[in-house]
Amino acid sequence: MPFVDPSTPDYNKGDFNIDDMMRHLGIFTIYLAEHADEYGAKLNSVFISGGSSGGHLASAMALAIASGKYTDIFSQNLTIKGLIPFYPANGQMVYFGIDGKEEFKNPEKLIDEDSPPCLIFQGTHDILNYFSITNNFRNTYLAEGNYECAILWMLLGGHASDFYFSGYYNQIFLYYMERFLYFYH
């Protein structure tokens, strides 16, 4: 049985699924492509990032765009150069009753040998997203013959340990993230 928070009012729950979320992200990609000049966006060098459930969505979005198979959802004017999920909750939406396409529910199914480079931030003491999620994601990259995926394990780091900007974890991750962006841009 999926987890349902009894304190959430019915008018806030809705009946959205992962496909709806991806469609909304797709609307953003189309908007970005149409307004790239206005915002100074460099569409030929796009990196996608997010934390926790946002890391899941970032993973699914980046891999779906890079695959070129979802032209009906995402703008194909974006070239995904990298993916940077923070403690991604890949595959965890099912526990909250969120359904949809298998490849969107579990972004590992979108990984192939040409998937964009990936840098994952993961704390060793994250009790919300277990190590197997991050390890399985990287192992899927490796199984596909793609060695462009690294995990940055943060010793004693918990879930969202990067939120304090000037804190230890965020400064280390920022250091490596900037180098990742520079290396793959």
Image (cartoon, rainbow, N blue to C red):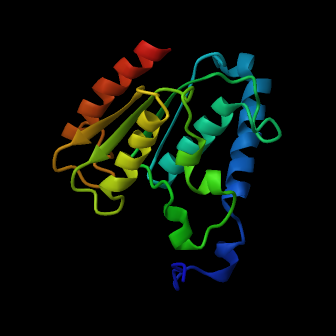
In the displayed structure image, the side of residue 96 where residue 126 appears, left or right: left
Residue 109, position as x, y percentages in the image? 58, 47
Residue at 38%, 38% in the rendered image: 120
The mark tally for this picture is 0
Farthest residue, direction right: 72
Name the quarter where the N terminus is drawn.
bottom right
Task: Residue at 53%, 42% (x, y): give it.
Answer: 59
> Which residue is nearer to you in this view: 135 or 52?
135
Side of 58 relative to 99 (left or right): left
Residue 158 versus residue 99: which sits nearer the camera? 99
- In this orientation, does residue 167 appear? no
Q: Is residue 71 visible?
A: yes
Q: Residue at left 34%, top 62%?
A: 128
Give the quarter of the image for residue 98.
Answer: bottom right
Residue drawn at x 72%, y 29% as measured from the top left: 32
Q: Position of residue 119 (x, y in %)?
A: 39, 32
Q: In the rendered image of this protein, does residue 174 appear above or below residue 61?
A: above
Residue 145 relative to residue 44: left or right: left
Task: Specify the farthest residue to the left.
Answer: 156
> Along the line of sight, which residue is nearer the eye, 46 or 109?
109
Residue 50 coordinates in the image, percent (x, y): 48, 43
